[in-house]
Amino acid sequence: MTPTRATERGCAPLHPPTSGNWVFYIRSDDSSILYFNPTGPNAAGKVIIQEETGCCNAFAGHTTAPQALVAGQGYYIEMLYKEGTGGDYGFTAARLFGQPAPTSDTADPIPGSMMVLAPRPAASVVR
């Protein structure tokens, strides 16, 4: 993926609520890459699990192989998407294997409840 104008990146630890085989989906304008670490929350183990080389295809067109995940365990997930011209967006969705593919950009991406960020340290004030 060679950026022509800008590349956006989103990453966070994913914590599935249910153990099982999870399938990930991507949708973007323009191209995008989805990285995932199937062994834990560190970026060092990430691998490419899906890529959209064009623009604006449906979630169902960019489906990953099922990933065996354990409920509550953290997994690193990262999406990069490129902006060429016009609109720009990148969406990632997840479903347990066998569930219908997502159909809506706004209702179907991975919910925030699955993307658990570490708490920030308390700020200190120096006077």
Image (tube, rainbow, N blue to C red):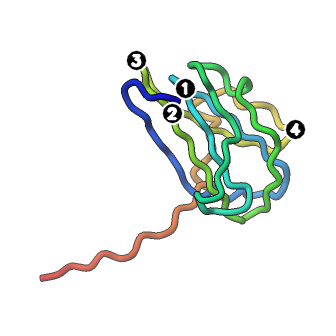
Q: Residue at x 52, y 38 (%)?
A: 80
Q: Nearer the viewer, residue 71 or 81?
A: 81
Separation of residues labelled 1 and 2 (CA atoms): 6 Å
Label 2 environment density (alpha carbons within 10 Å; few <14, some 14–19, many ≥20):
many
Q: Which residue is mark 3?
A: 85
Label 2 residue SS: strand
On screen, residue 84 above or below 50: above
Residue topped by disc 1? 31
- Give how far apart the Cα atoms at labels 1 and 4 are: 26 Å
Q: Residues within 10 Å of mark 1 (few under 14, many from 20)?
A: many
* Residue drawn at 61 percent across, 28 percent down: 27
Disc 2: which residue: 81
**Front tag of 2 and 4:** 2
Q: Secondary structure at mark 3?
A: loop
Q: In the image, 12: left or right of 58?
A: left
Q: CA distance from mark 1 to mark 3?
A: 12 Å
